Amino acid sequence: MSLLTLTPGDVTLADLERVYREELAVSIDRAAKPAIDAAAARVAEAARGEEAVYGVNTGFGKLASVKIAPGDTATLQRNLILSHCCGVGEALDRATTRLMMALKLLSLGRGASGVRFEVMELIEACLARGVTPVVPAQGSVGASGDLAPLAHMTAVLIGAGEAEFGGTRMPGAEALAKAGLAPVVLGPKEGLGLINGTQFSTACALVGLFTAWRLAEATLVTASLSTDAIMGSTAPLLAEIHALRGHRGQIEVASAMRALMEGSQIRESHRTGDSRVQDPYCIRCQPQVAGACVDLLRMAGRTLEIEANAATDNPLVLIDEGRIVSGGNFHAEPVAFAADQIALAIAELGAIAQRRVALMVDPTLSFDLPPFLARDPGLNSGMMIAEVTTAALMSENKHLAHPCSTDSTPTSANQEDHVSMAAHGARRLVRMNANLAVILGVELLCAAEGIEHRAPLATSAPLAAVIARLRDHVAALEVDRYMAPDLERAARLVTSRELVAAASAENLITLGEAA
């Protein structure tokens, strides 16, 4: 397994995507160790003292006024983990769980949590040897950290809970033993340091972002295909139009679509003599809509990159001042807002794509394409119900895009009286992305049929390469057939970046800073 060394406070979205997609082992830069050791020593000193320090020698939440004897601190931390293992629902997938573990290492690596380096080394070893905690996905409100999910992760480190090892789910202690690892006994504050924080919400939001970005790239290809299929105009893509507005995403989407459509015989065939004055907005305003979505994803990405590098537990150890101070960095409001932004972008990319699908199957709007793109309309229904499916998924995503960050409910005897709801705001993104992938997959199928109907006129070389790649997986729709596998294969192509690669469009837009 490849190893990636990460420097706490200086990790990029690209690094995190590699951790997620390649399931890399992760090591924290050893230059961080002195600060980590110093914070742990300060916590150990506080645990031996008489002064009450929250989470070190006191109870938790509403029970913070209860003083804990020095001899009971290990029991306190173990009880904290076991009592907080209250997650329910399906387990988080393996890759996202591993990303969450890497994010926890990054947070602890800032040297403000007071967790010993040996505990971090056990997390590193679990990642390297394939011990993945089983983490139920429901139970966090994103307030005092993602308490329940992170407790399930931590339970494995102390030899409790469940883990997956070698493809088999088993007790956590057994998984550690099979991997040649031993559980730790948590010291003062270590349980709290491990379960406070936003790493579950942040991991889920990052996964949503990474997939949404791939789909945003794919929509450049599918939108270009649809524009050519209905013989749409490329005049709205002129650089001068978008420069006058100035939004980076809009400018880049228009530029990408111009590049993808350059050299299309279909486009050249109707530059003169076309009775249409303007195309519908789903064609004409694609740079404005998709560009705004791209910019929104970038804003969310920047928030999540900052959060991934943050110390988000409580209390925090301020080494330079020699103090342990209670705060609220565990509150996941920034992550909740980022998740809402990503959800809005996903919903809007699907909404405008669905209208392009509807355009292509409607003979009154598609500029002489056959009804529902059927080769023998009437006897065959063609893409009629595939379009209905996109409408269903578009509508579902609209409902799912309702903001989660505006919701709150008091918990923990009103101690946690305002919560972010970041966890389920981030978790829904998987479902929304899956819906969007199908919408874009159907658009791909419809646009390919439309362009093939324009023969002998040919589309551009990049778009022709995309259609050729599609035809390796899905045959042209000569007659009606069982359609579900076609939709599934097309959605996989969209998500995998194969279409973007076929069009040589990998770098037409980038998630990071402008070049």
Image (cartoon, helix red, strand yellow):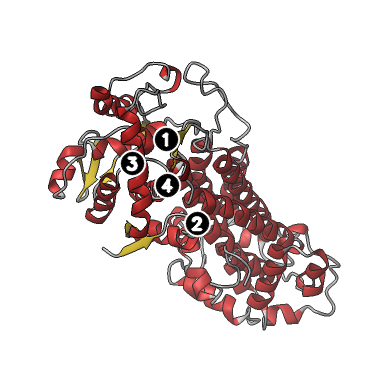
Location of the N terminus by quadrant is bottom left
Q: Is residue 382 visible?
A: no
Q: Is the residue marked by circle 4 packed among few (<14), some (14-19), or many (20+) residues within 10 Å?
A: many
| Callout 1: SS | loop
Q: In the drawing, what numbered circle is on residue 107?
A: 4
Please name which of the two marks, 3 or 1, marks the residue nearer to the observer.
Answer: 3
Query: Which of the two residues, 150 or 86, is positioned nearer the viewer here?
Result: 150
Q: Is the residue marked by circle 3 packed among few (<14), some (14-19), or many (20+) residues within 10 Å?
A: many
Name the N-terminal-most of marks 1 and 4: 4
The type of residue carrying mark 3 is Ala
Q: Are marks 3 and 4 in contact (CB under 8 Å)?
A: no
User: Does 73 sit left or right of 380 as displayed?
Assistant: left
Q: Is residue 512 visible?
A: yes
Q: Give me the residue at 55% from left, 52% from top.
A: 436
Name the N-terminal-most of marks 1 and 2: 1
Q: Is the residue marked by circle 2 packed among few (<14), some (14-19), or many (20+) residues within 10 Å?
A: some
Residue 136 percent across, percent down from the top left: 35, 35
Query: Which of the two residues, 221 or 17, is positioned nearer the viewer here?
Result: 17
| Callout 4: SS | helix
Residues under labels 1 and 2: Cα distance?
25 Å
| Callout 2: SS | helix
Please name which of the two marks, 3 or 4, marks the residue nearer to the observer.
Answer: 3
Name the N-terminal-most of marks 3 and 1: 3
Residues under labels 2 and 3: Cα distance?
34 Å
Q: In the drawing, what numbered circle is on residue 40?
A: 3
Residues under labels 3 and 4: Cα distance?
14 Å
The type of residue carrying mark 1 is Asn
Q: Are marks 1 and 2 in contact (CB under 8 Å)?
A: no
| Pointer 1 residue | 196
Q: In the drawing, what numbered circle is on residue 333?
A: none
| Pointer 2 residue | 210
